[in-house]
Structure formats: structure tokens, C-alpha cells
Amino acid sequence: MPDSVNGLPLHPLVVHAVVVLLPLAALGVAALAVRPAWRGRFGWLVVLVAALATAAVPLATESGESLERRVGDPGRHAALGDQLIWFALPLLVAAGALVWLHRRAHRPAGDARTAGPGVLGVVVAVLAVVVAAANLVQVYRVGDSGAKAVWGDTPAATAGSGGEDGD
């Protein structure tokens, strides 16, 4: 994999796929968990977004390792980034489980359909919400540590202002 595109490091470009897709998938999984009626209509879309996000995580990690060889160790950011796949994979499984439960509940069994979500459906929905929340927190933690690795404790808006307050 190349480590740059048009002279720019590949890592910040690839990271944007994770930063957009993984929270979107997490919100989608949470929505499917609390609104079972949406599972039939949007379930496969959420599974697709979760799969793309999960596939993007190793690309971000690999491109980050390439960047690390060029600019040095980002410290905590690298460790947190390495852990992100272990959040994304359960999210993908949760998305798939919610869709599977919907298909199972709505398959024809003679003329009758399975009524209600059942205990398994409730347990999966609760776990899906927990996994989705954990993903949102971890994406924030990885991004925050990455920003601190690049910017330190200096906010970007004041980095070049020289302390002027515009009066």
C-alpha cells in the first residue's frame, strides 16, 4: 500500500473513512436496536456500512504504522488505534444479529409469524446499544489522542494567532 497520495500522508485520508463510517454504523445499529421496525428496511444498509467501516480500520492502522515510521511514535494514539478493530468487529456482528433476528421473526411458519422480539431479541438489542456506544467512545478516544499527537495541547484555532484576541 502506498504511504502517500499527491504528497500527503495516506493515514489522515484513510482515517476519515473510519471517522465517518464507524460512528454512522454505530448510530445505525443503535437505531435498529431501539426501532425493530426499521430492521427490514435499513438493516442490510447498516450491515454494509458496518462492514465497510470494519474493513477501513486495518487500512487506517496500516497507513498509521507507515506514517509512524516516517514521523515517530504517536504514543497512546497508536495503542488506541490498534484496539479499534476489537470494537468494530462486535459492531458488525451486532448489526448482522439484528438483521438475522428480524428475518427469523418474519419468516413464514405456515400462516403464523413469530410474535414479539422474545428474550433473545431484547438481549441482542441491549448488547447492540452497548457495543454501539462503546464504538462511539473509542472513535472519540482514538481521534482525540491523534489530534493531541499532532497538535499537542495547543488548539488549532490559536496555534498561529500569537495571542491576539481581535479587539
Image: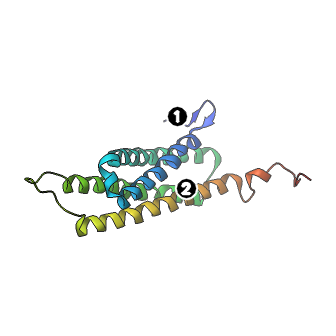
Residue 86 appears in the picture as rendered: no
Q: In the image, which disc is placed on residue 151?
A: none
Q: In the image, which disc is placed on residue 2?
A: 1
* Residue under the image location 25 percent in, 54 percent down: 102
**Residue 36 falls left or right of residue 31:** left
**Residue 69 falls left or right of residue 135:** right
> Residue 110's x, y, as percent?
7, 53
Amino acid under disc 2: Ala
Q: Seen from this angle, which residue lies furthest front?
A: 111
Query: Are dots 1 and 2 in contact, CB under 8 Å?
Result: no
* Residue under the image location 88 percent in, 54 percent down: 165
Q: Quadrant of residue 93?
A: bottom left
In space, the residues marked 1 and 2 are separated at their CA atoms by 19 Å
The one nearer the camera, 6 or 48, is 48
The colour mode here is rainbow
Q: Seen from this angle, which residue lies furthest right?
A: 167
Amino acid under disc 1: Pro
Mark 2 falls on what kind of element? helix
> Residue 6's x, y, as percent?
61, 29
**Residue 145 falls left or right of residue 48:** right
Going from N to C along the chain, the mark reached first, 1 or 2, is 1
Q: Seen from this angle, which residue lies furthest left?
A: 110
Mark 1 falls on what kind of element? loop
The one nearer the camera, 97 or 9, is 97
Residue 21 appears in the picture as rendered: yes
Q: In the image, which disc is placed on residue 78?
A: 2
**Residue 36 falls left or right of residue 156:** left
The one nearer the camera, 34 or 128, is 34
> Residue 36's x, y, as percent?
32, 57
> Residue 12's x, y, as percent?
59, 43
